[in-house]
Image (tube, helix red, strand yellow):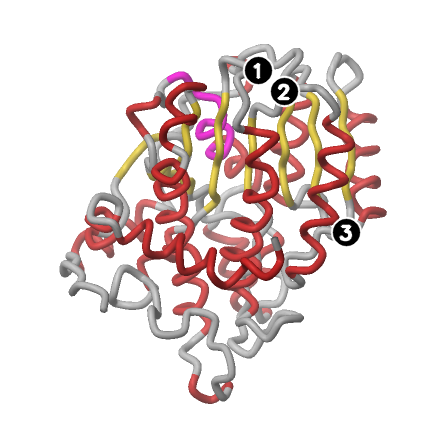
Amino acid sequence: MTEPAPSFSKIKTLYDMYYGFRPNKPTFLPEEYPDLTGKTAIVTGCNTGIGYFVMKLLYSKNCNVIAVVRTESKGIEAREKVLEEIKESSGSISVVGGCDLLDMTSIKSAAEKVKQTLGDKPLNIIIHNAGLMSSFNDGVSKQGIEAMFSTNVMGPQLLQHFLDPLFLKKDSDFKRIVWVSSVAHLVGFPQYGINWENPGFINEPLDKRPAYWTLYGQSKAANILQAKAWYTKNQKIADEIGCVSVSCYPGNLKSELSRDFGTISKFVIMSVCWDVIYGAYSELYAALSPDLTTKDQGAYVVPFGEVQDPRNDLKVGLTNGTDLKLFNMVEDMIKDYF
């Protein structure tokens, strides 16, 4: 049984939704980013959108970027575009294809390619940027899991499982993980955002599923819980190496996530939302800012680079064990693919 979740304020919910359209200006911009010579970052979903700009900005600061993508040819195309635009960098961009977050069986082999690409270099930054936001509620993964839960929750946690042995090493003084969430966590399920009985809607008729925004909201609530739970599960070594694990809501953006929305919805998004690069500013605040320390484990970063609270029940869930319950439940769902 899951203990009853605290209620959350409708006023705060409305404020948080409004804030995404009129956030504070970014305070941590590329000219303030540290030199990343000798550091390596893994970024998922780099072909387009936020991930592309994250890859580009990291590379501009001499970072070795490993772009983990589903389609290798598209990743290579994005890399070549960055290399054409950024002429001066001592960093590198490597592309690892074949990581399909809708197919759990693909992730282990992709992680092995990451290991080979990394070699003996330290792994400093992991940004779980790849995601799916569908305007339909009928998507399923290769394993029969609701598509957004598979892509946004199970896939990142399984990939992180394989990356942990590479990441949790005393080989650098800078370690950071970013789990990309969204303001949509506000419209997840009532109990800490999660449908605890069957979050993947396995073997349930499609007509029993809730609206797509509730499914997407569930996945983004899970990301907030994962950020804190990962730290708790790895607290001893994470404290020793100074790793910080946070979630990040990049902003309301004109991104590829809305690609399957209708014409009117796309028009509204393009009219009121922000350019995609602002989302990169949010994610790189989470990944690089010295404002975040080991005292900020599980922090929720909002646009365009500051820490606020998620909805109230999730805020409580980060301290009462709900985060670990979610993490352990997902671990049980992915263990057959270890």
What residue is shown at x 48% (from left), y 27% (from top)? 176
Q: Position of residue 190 (x, y in %)?
A: 25, 67
For disc 3, the marked residue is 98
* Amino acid beneath label 2: Pro
Measure how far apart labels 2 and 1 are at the Cα level: 6 Å
For disc 1, the marked residue is 171
**Are discs 1 and 3 less than 8 Å apart at CB?**
no
Based on the picture, tell me whether residue 125 belongs to the magenta stretch: no
Mark linked to residue 323: none
**Are discs 2 and 1 less than 8 Å apart at CB?**
yes
Query: Label 2's element?
Result: loop
The answer to whether residue 232 is left or right of residue 259 is left
* Amino acid beneath label 1: Asp
State which region is magenta: 282-290
For disc 2, the marked residue is 122
Q: How many marks can you see?
A: 3
